[in-house]
Image (cartoon, helix red, strand yellow):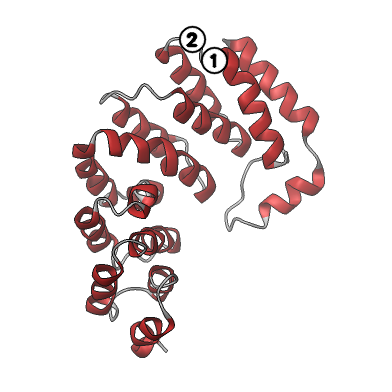
Amino acid sequence: MNNIIREIRNELESQADDKTKNNSQRFFKEKVKCYGVKTSIVSKISKQYFIIVKKLDKGKVFKLCEELFASGYCEESWIAANWSHRYGNFTEKDFKIYEYWINNYIDNWAECDTLCNHTVGEFIEKYPQYVNGLKEWAKSKNRWLKRASAVSLIIPARKGKFLQDILDISDILLCDRDDMVQKGYGWMLKEASRKNQKEIFEYVMKNKDDMPRTALRYAIEKMPEDLKRKAMEKQL
């Protein structure tokens, strides 16, 4: 197993370039740790080694994922998130593992979203009772768990699922001062508005005087111009 990690790291180092590394930093407010490998190449490496990984039992796969997450490198985190999703075979025990990874290793929005949009989101669709766990994440002091509580529902929201839970999580995060959290739940509301525009618009109108402008703008992004104007009236 250590050979796999070593080979991946050697490959990432060989594919790194300073231009990509410098450009990557522009997308983050905080300092991030990365090799400087293009996303398409990281994806190719991930797929290449998953052919080996998928033959292992789940416990070994998750140990590899954890070692990649623990490195602190964005590219390794993206590979770990990809593997945890592609491997599938979700069980209820996974939720606490995801929580541990986010709480201990995730330190930027890209790592958070890559893991949560797909792996955690698909888990929640399979085990919908764990949406209550997301509500507990929303109450956390960890900014990435709070963001994760929202962005884990992006794809289900797009399908029109979990509407009441989305509103419940938004209530918890409503006045959060962290822009990473505001953007996370605003994005969730935006995706929910695709199938539930009336309900999301009513929610925004009810809460717009308390909702931070960042979250509000995200939430109404896909709405018709007349609804956007109404939502923004007191925010100008």
In x, y percent, where is residue 112? 46, 44
Residue type (three-letter) at the residue carrying disc 2: Leu
In x, y percent, where is residue 170? 27, 61
Q: Secondary structure at mark 1?
A: helix
In x, y percent, where is residue 35? 71, 37
Residue shown at 22%/39% (left/top)?
Answer: 128
Disc 2 vs disc 1: Cβ atoms closer than 8 Å? yes
* Image disc number at residue 93: none
Circle 2 is placed at which residue position?
Answer: 56
Circle 1 is placed at which residue position?
Answer: 53
Q: Secondary structure at mark 2?
A: loop
Above or below residue 229? Residue 190 is above
Q: Looking at the figure, which quarter contains the C terminus?
A: bottom left
Q: Looking at the figure, which quarter contains the N terminus?
A: top right
Left or right, residue 141 beside residue 6: left
Rate crowding at label 1 as few (under 14), some (14 to 19) or many (20 or more) other CA atoms within 10 Å.
some
Above or below residue 58? Residue 121 is below
Residue shown at 52%/32% (left/top)?
Answer: 82
Say which quarter of the image contains residue 131.
top left
Say which quarter of the image contains residue 7.
top right
Residue shown at 55%/26% (left/top)?
Answer: 68
Residue type (three-letter) at the residue carrying disc 1: Val
Residue shown at 19%/44% (left/top)?
Answer: 132
Say which quarter of the image contains residue 199.
bottom left
Above or below residue 155? Residue 225 is below
Left or right, residue 168 beside residue 21: left
Rate crowding at label 2 as few (under 14), some (14 to 19) or many (20 or more) other CA atoms within 10 Å.
some
In x, y percent, where is residue 53? 54, 15
